[in-house]
Image: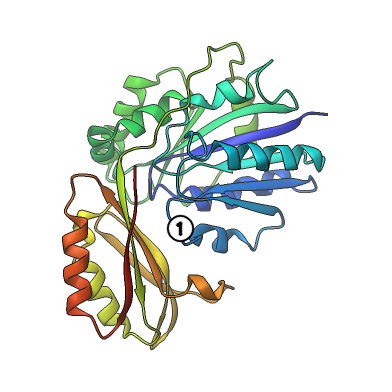
Amino acid sequence: MATELYLITGFLGAGKSTLLKNFIRLFAGRKVQLIINEFGRAGIDGALLAELDAELSEITGGSVFCSCRIDQFVSAIEKFVADDTEVVLVEASGLSDPTGVRGLFGEGRQFPAIAYKGAICLIDAVRFPKIYAKSRTATKQLAASDVLIVNKIDKATPEQLQATEELVRAQRPDLPLIETRFGQIDVSILDQLAGQVDHAAAPMPLTADLTLRKMLLTFKPGIERQALEKCIRMFLEVTFRVKGFVQTAEGLVLVDAVGTDLVITPYAGAVRPELIGKLVILSGAKMPMASRVKEAARWYEQEVADLQAGDQR
């Protein structure tokens, strides 16, 4: 029997990790493997998903559909097929262009043992119009999708929700659209996917990721939570995403920011020691992230242990 593969896409902060946790429950009793395509080097979402009852592979430093990381992706898929895995769930980087997916998994293509079941595109009901206007990646993710999920409807005004769905429908009026909050779905989504995938569609080539810049800001243990928040807010408005675990004076916290929306919450789960203290910061190529982060690091030099520039794509 072929191994089923499902893809979850969506721009940074749409809630893909939460959706994945809900999605995996639909396959209770089956042998499931996860491939998490990180947006940064710190392995953060992998730590959050380690609680799930499935084997986890992480691919970092680029999109699974970019030529820069396709070898890692291929190796993970081959291993899973050899292990008689029944279901593979792939969470793609929020900055990836997934339009090459059918070139890998369509009939008669590179992986005949994989039954590609389709792509779910998760959409932030509040932020999507702004993202869509600035990022070609958002249009690529819609183009590759088979079912659309508009998430965070509880945070959107009626006007925001209407604007988001009008944009989505203008590009993909042919697809099922589900409205939800907290990534909540039920088993009916599998039937909706089954009716959408066109294996005869022409494959599209692998592409490069969205141009981006990354930085890794490391804090010493024991920073005051209020100081941590003030430091992050010094550069938050010029970033796409900020995420990481920090050991504060009040305890271990998870920092999770999308745009200017910053959430810092206590975290009681298991985290690999080498991840603690590290914030992955991501921005666009023309955003003044570097100067703002360096300024914040100078202001809080007693609390900052290290600052590194990441890869540029």
Left or right? Give the position of 50 relative to 143: right
Residue 110 appears in which quarter of the rendering? top right
Residue at 30 percent of width and 30 percent of height: 136
The answer to whether 205 is drawn above or below residue 268 in the figure is: above
Q: Residues within 10 Å of mark 1 (few under 14, many from 20)?
A: some
Q: Nearer the viewer, residue 289 or 120?
A: 289
According to the picture, the residue beneath numbered tag 1 turns out to be 41
Report the quarter where the C terminus lies: top left
x then y, percent, for residue 161: 31, 38
Give amino acid for label 1. Answer: Arg
Report the quarter where the N terminus lies: top right
Q: Which of 237 and 103 is in front in this view?
A: 103
Helix, strand or loop for disc 1: loop
Residue at 47 percent of width and 52 percent of height: 182
Left or right? Give the position of 16 relative to 249: right
Residue at 55 percent of width and 12 percent of height: 201
Left or right? Give the position of 6 relative to 311: right
x then y, percent, for residue 99: 47, 25
x then y, percent, for residue 240: 29, 51
